[in-house]
Image: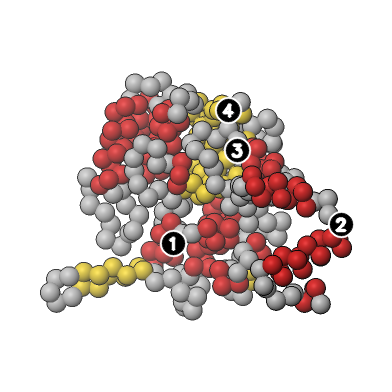
Amino acid sequence: MPQPDELSFDFLTGREGDFMETVMDDLKAVPWAKPLVADINKNGGLKGENKAKLFELRFGSELHKAGIQPRYEVAGEGDSTLDYGFASGGQEYLVEMMRLEETDAVRAATTKEEFEDGAVMVKRQLTTTAEDSRQSEEGETLKAVERICQKFERDGTPHKFPPPGSATHVLLADVRTLFNGGDKWDRVNVGLGGEYVPHEFFRRYYRGRLVTGVFSPKTTLKGAAEARERLHFIGFVNEQSYENGGFGSSIQFIANPHLFKSVEDARAALAGWPLGEPEILNAPKVPPRLQKLVHAMSNLKVGEAAELSQLLRSKWRLPSSDADR
């Protein structure tokens, strides 16, 4: 296996390579996978330059193991294609996949220091106060929004996903290079924008302006309008292990609030998702017990709700809120 670039944190690991060798062998004779496996082999096989294709193949392998025979490279908008189409749980899904590759700004923020004893330290520093504002977490967040939006427009016309119909449209993005995989607030910043992040500390501002996400109506980047109109979900994929069954649990979804009237509608659109129960960050699953409480309390009058609030505060020995005084 080729040696990774010393200044890159985005390389094909030994564990990933070993797992993909097995996957490729298992799928080499499967009709839908044959052209993808052949393409990977034609371009050098298990090497870093093929990470995007290997990412596609891992997802297809998980579908295959779930008993689904997907369609690879299905027709998309215009002359484009989408990576996968498949039916599961009585629902149809169209899935496009992409990797957020290391940016030029990130690579420029990476330095190597060699010590007298021969040791080498590689350091990457993204700071708000960087001389080049792109070499910051805020800059990387904005760049991620930009790259996702660009998938949906080409030469002034919509690209990739058709207008919404009977299928659920999903973009799966490999985010291993974005803040080393990042966390849920990074995903909310990218998918929805800083206004959806409840804690000011986790909001991202670029050159003093709050970063708006892919699904935000305030985002005017190329392809943003098409993404809001045509994409149901962004799935942020941060694989921690490379093994059978590991792909589904590595995804956190953001639902497009412009295409769903309620949390329940968003969850219903992924009810047939075949890789385990999906985690939708802005449409979390409510435990049945709490659902019953919400249903019961929805019929309360305003005065009754205020009285209930006072009774609960008294029972839990909490101080009264300003609204109760």
The x and y percentages for residue 215 are: 65, 53
| Residue designated by label 2 | 301
Residue beneath the point at 53% across and 40% down? 277
Asked if the residue under mark 4 is in contact with the one under mark 3, i.e. CB atoms within 8 Å, the reply is no
Look at label 4 and name its amino acid.
Gly
Residue beneath the point at 61% across and 75% down? 208
| Residue designated by label 1 | 179
| Cα distance between the residues tagged 4 and 1 | 34 Å
| Residue designated by label 4 | 89
Earlier sequence position, callout 3 versus callout 1: 1
- Element marked by disc 4: loop
Earlier sequence position, callout 3 versus callout 4: 4
| Residue designated by label 3 | 270
Image quadrant in which the N terminus is located: top left
Asked if the residue under mark 1 is in contact with the one under mark 2, i.e. CB atoms within 8 Å, the reply is no
Look at label 3 and name its amino acid.
Leu
Earlier sequence position, callout 2 versus callout 3: 3
Decide if residue 263 is on the left or right side of residue 105.
right
